[in-house]
Image: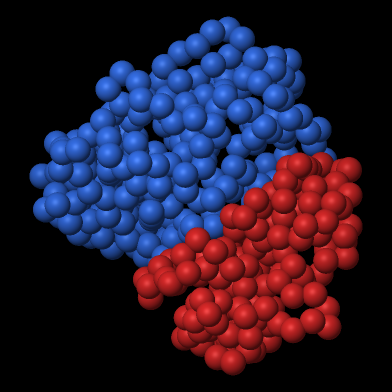
Chain colours: A red, B blue
């Protein structure tokens, strides 16, 4: 499988979820694990460009596919990705637990729809739960991200 | 590891999958996994074998057939929802798909998987029933067509045999008056009460052990839904009347 553009080892045990393989096998702990049954959205990654729940995918199913995680948005020590800048500016995060999921769905949304309407933003983030910041800030962040990435 | 131990199989063709399903004891088909993998993670399902059909290219197509559209077992809900042929021939289906969970779940979940899972509160099962659609099931013993009215037997229980693979769902072309409406606790949840109408046919869901056809003039007749937290059976029937009224006006 390729993760953020690099060839990485596949999982060997078919019981391993993609979320656990990313975190424990590959050390990519930016993908967070919340509910582990597809409800919270924290573990959302892109599979061949489409957002999916990594806790509802067996790691072996990612063989031969391209996975993008939050680590792929901006490398360590490098400037933040415009989506991350927008979340920072607009108070789109507080504790940050849900943030990787929101960043990944936002990145997929803006890749196909650079100027989303309010309704399209709400639809895109509707499967992700936040327990502290509140969705108003997150909505603002996505709007701001669209402005920043559109430049 | 979340799931209990299982042996994993990833056949490359339907023929290969059917041999596996015929030979293996206690095998379960894995398609999109958006219902099955949560069950595995909770260990509510502990199959000895998983037969993953995701690599079977021939199951990934949407084609026109017999005055309708045939949707292969690997077609994602999001792809069916956006498909021009589906939108053109059976516009009710994309509307129903829009109520299935969230976009991220629909990117992986399949139309056929939802039908095989047979959740009594699932939008797609009721939509297939309202449209009088059918599914095709194949096994080494042969192939059969199962109509929607024969497919759903009870909660998470379909008429599919253990060695059968649901290879495609068929929805008739339908551009007449159609609508779907549901009441849910949160956006994307399974319905507390739902109704889908295709012309004169009305199917209700979430209020019985399986989706069923109902009389628009008396939709709650014979129904006794279970109580849910903060939602009594009487209230669910009240909601059902409301959603039926909505779809009948459409």
In the visual, does B244 lie left or right of B69?
A: left
**Could you tell me residue B147's position as x and y percent?**
36, 23
In the visual, does A46 lie left or right of B173?
A: right
Q: Using the image as rendered, state which of residue B88 and residue B43 is in the foreground.
A: B88
**Could you tell me residue A111's position as x and y percent?**
54, 64
Residue B189 visible at all: yes
Report the residue at 71% width, 82% height from top: A80
Q: Quadrant of residue B105?
A: bottom right
In the picture as drawn, the residue positioned furthest to the front comes out as: A151
Report the residue at 57% width, 47% height from top: B108
**Could you tell me residue B164's position as x and y percent?**
57, 20
Q: Using the image as rendered, state which of residue A119 and residue B123 is in the foreground.
A: A119
The number of discs equals: 0
Residue B14 position (above or below residue B239): above
Report the residue at 63% width, 89% height from top: A88
Report the residue at 54% width, 57% height from top: B104
Q: Using the image as rendered, state which of residue B223 and residue B66 is in the foreground.
A: B66
Residue B214 visible at all: no
């Amino acid at each position: 499988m390729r993760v953020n553009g690099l060839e990485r080892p596949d999982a060997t045990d078919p019981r391993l979820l993609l979320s656990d393989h990313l975190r424990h096998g590959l050390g990519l702990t930016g993908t967070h694990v919340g509910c582990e049954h597809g409800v919270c959205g924290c573990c959302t990654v892109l599979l061949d460009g489409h957002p999916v729940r990594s806790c509802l995918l067996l790691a072996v199913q990612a063989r031969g596919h391209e996975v993008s995680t939050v680590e792929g948005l901006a490398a360590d020590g490098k400037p933040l990705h415009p989506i991350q800048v927008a979340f920072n500016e607009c108070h789109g995060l507080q504790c940050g637990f849900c943030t990787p999921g929101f960043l990944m769905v936002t990145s997929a949304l803006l890749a196909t729809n650079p100027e989303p309407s309010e309704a399209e933003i709400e639809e895109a983030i509707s499967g992700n739960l936040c327990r502290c910041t509140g969705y108003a800030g997150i909505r603002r962040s996505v709007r701001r991200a669209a402005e920043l990435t559109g430049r | 590891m979340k799931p209990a131990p299982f042996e994993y199989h990833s056949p490359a063709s339907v023929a290969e999958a059917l041999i596996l399903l015929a030979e293996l004891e206690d095998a379960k088909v894995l398609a999109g996994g958006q219902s099955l993998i949560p069950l595995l993670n909770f260990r509510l399902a502990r199959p000895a074998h998983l037969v993953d059909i995701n690599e079977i290219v021939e199951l990934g197509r949407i084609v026109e057939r017999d005055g309708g559209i045939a949707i292969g077992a690997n077609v994602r809900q999001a792809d069916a929802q956006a498909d021009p042929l589906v939108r053109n021939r059976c516009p009710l289906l994309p509307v129903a798909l829009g109520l299935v969970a969230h976009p991220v779940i629909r990117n992986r979940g399949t139309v056929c998987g939802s039908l095989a899972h047979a959740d009594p509160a699932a939008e797609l099962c009721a939509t297939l029933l309202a449209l009088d659609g059918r599914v095709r099931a194949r096994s080494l013993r042969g192939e059969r067509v199962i109509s929607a009215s024969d497919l759903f037997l009870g909660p998470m229980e379909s008429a599919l045999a253990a060695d059968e693979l649901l290879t495609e769902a068929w929805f008739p072309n339908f551009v007449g008056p159609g609508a779907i409406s549901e009441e849910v606790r949160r956006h994307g949840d399974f319905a507390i009460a739902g109704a889908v109408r295709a012309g004169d046919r009305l199917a209700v869901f979430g209020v019985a052990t399986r989706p069923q056809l109902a009389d628009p003039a008396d939709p709650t007749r014979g129904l006794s839904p279970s109580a849910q937290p903060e939602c009594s059976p009487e209230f669910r029937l009240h909601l059902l009347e409301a959603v039926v009224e909505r779809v009948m006006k459409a």
